[in-house]
Amino acid sequence: MEQQKNSDSIEAAAQDATTASTDKPRGGKRRRENSAVKEYALIILYAVLIAFLLKTFVVRGFYIPSSSMEDTLQINDRVFVNVAGGLFTEAERGDIVVFKDTQGWMPVSTSSNPVRDALAFVGVMPDSSSNYLVKRVIGVGGDHIVGTADGRITVNGVEIDETYLKPGVSPTELPFDVIVPQNSYFVMGDNRSNSADSRYHIQTGTEFINDADVVGEVFVVAWPLSSFTFIGEASDVFADVPDTE
């Protein structure tokens, strides 16, 4: 009887040991899985944070939706903008800049993709919203810019030869005469016949872009790879233009 009792105790103890040895690895596996999930979540969080900081202070991607900057920029191009430079320096004549449309040049867009907007906000995807425009700086604060009836453009009395224009287009088909306020810019598209730029907003008094609205200068076409190119300077076009006092 005593032997049977001892046998039962040994069997029970062995069963408990087997159960414990089985449960222990399962618990350890769950802990490892939870740890891996946390690590992946932190990696994603850090990646998003880094992308947001890069987009805010270093470079930012944008999508080109129209032909107003052809042939320099094509529809569906993805470009990068030098945000850091825009934080510390002002744009110069000839620079291609992206700026926020605070003047109401574009109609308000009612359609949006929340997921794409969120990814663009943190810098993971290029911004394709209609709140931003891309044009070339023709005049800076103090410049006197004239577009003549025969299609010529002068800046501070000097006619400019704009070699970056889309072949076959006139420098301007719309005459104008403006003086750019300080901390502002007069901008135009390279495809002048298809660009609703500063010239077309003179009548409403919204032709000038505020320096505070400039995101930065476009410095590279990054996508598609077949179009990959760094944007060259156009300072030679304005080399003979005198600065204003």
Image (cartoon, rainbow, N blue to C red):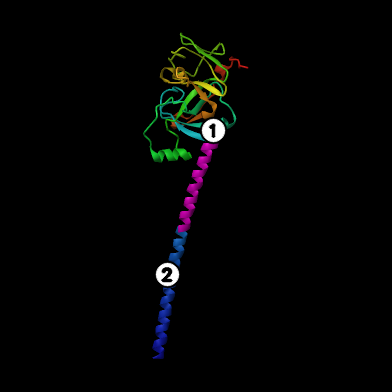
Q: Amino acid at mark 2?
A: Thr
Q: Secondary structure at mark 2?
A: helix
Q: In the image shown, does 143 or 63 lie closer to the viewer?
A: 143
Q: Which mark is residue 180?
A: none
Closer to us: mark 1 or mark 2? 1
Task: Say what secondary structure mark 1 lies in.
Answer: helix
Taking 205 as reference, is 87 left or right? right
Which residue is labeled 1 in the image? 83
Residue under label 2: 22
Q: Magenta stretch: residue 55 in it?
A: yes
Q: Identify the magenta region.
A: 34-57
For disc 1, the neighbor class at 10 Å (few under 14, some 14 to 19, many from 20) is many
Distance from Cα at disc 1 to Cα at disc 2: 57 Å
Residue displayed at 42% across by 74% down: 18
Position of residue 75 measured from the top left corner of the image (x, y, whole percent):
41, 27
- For the residue pair 14 and 63, the one nearer the viewer reads as 63
What crowding class fits label 2: few (fewer than 14 Cα within 10 Å), some (14-19), or many (20 or more)?
few
Amino acid type at mark 1 = Val
